[in-house]
Image (cartoon, grey):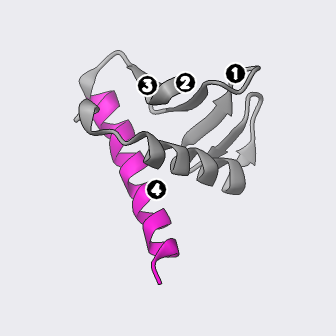
Amino acid sequence: MINELDCRQLLHVYSLVMEQGEPTEYGKQYQGIEAFSDYDGYSIYLRGNGVQLKLGFHNTYHLDYDDEWQKERFLRVLKVMLQSINKCSAP
């Protein structure tokens, strides 16, 4: 499943969190997902449920988690967010 992540979709989730989220110490949080970027803006992060996803330059990404169930739960939340984005953008 990791290889199936689409960086463009991850950017859509990041944008949704930044637009709809509540401010946090590092960025914004929406539906249990926190989004923020590093100081130069080259890398963005999505964090929640014990998982941190770093989306870097040239559409590279890295998932950091302790247990497989954390990753699966995190990816399910992202999928639900993407479905809500797709519903809103449908004609």
Q: Is 84 left, or right, of 3 in this rendering?
A: right
Q: Secondary structure at mark 4?
A: helix
Residue named by callout 4: 81
Q: Quadrant of residue 87?
A: bottom left
Q: Residue 75's spot in the image, x, y percent?
A: 35, 40
Q: Residues within 10 Å of mark 1 (few under 14, many from 20)?
A: few
For the residue marked with disc 2, what is the amino acid? Phe
Residue underneath mark 2: 57
45 on left or right of 86? right
Badge number at residue 61: 3
Element on which disc 1 rests: loop
Mark in front: 2 vs 3:
2
**To which residue does mark 1 refer?**
38
What residue occupies the far left of the structure in this picture?
A: 1
Amino acid at pointer 1: Asp
- For marks 4 and 3, give the one nearer the viewer: 3
Q: Quadrant of the N terminus?
A: top left
Magenta-span inclusion, residue 79: yes
Local crowd at mark 3 within 10 Å, few (<14), some, or many (≥20)? many
Q: Residue at x 43, y 25 (%)?
A: 61
Question: Going from the N terminus, do you reach mark 4 or mark 2 first?
Answer: 2
Q: Secondary structure at mark 2?
A: helix
Q: Residue at x 60, y 37 (%)?
A: 34
Pointers 4 and 2 in contact (C-beta within 8 Å): no
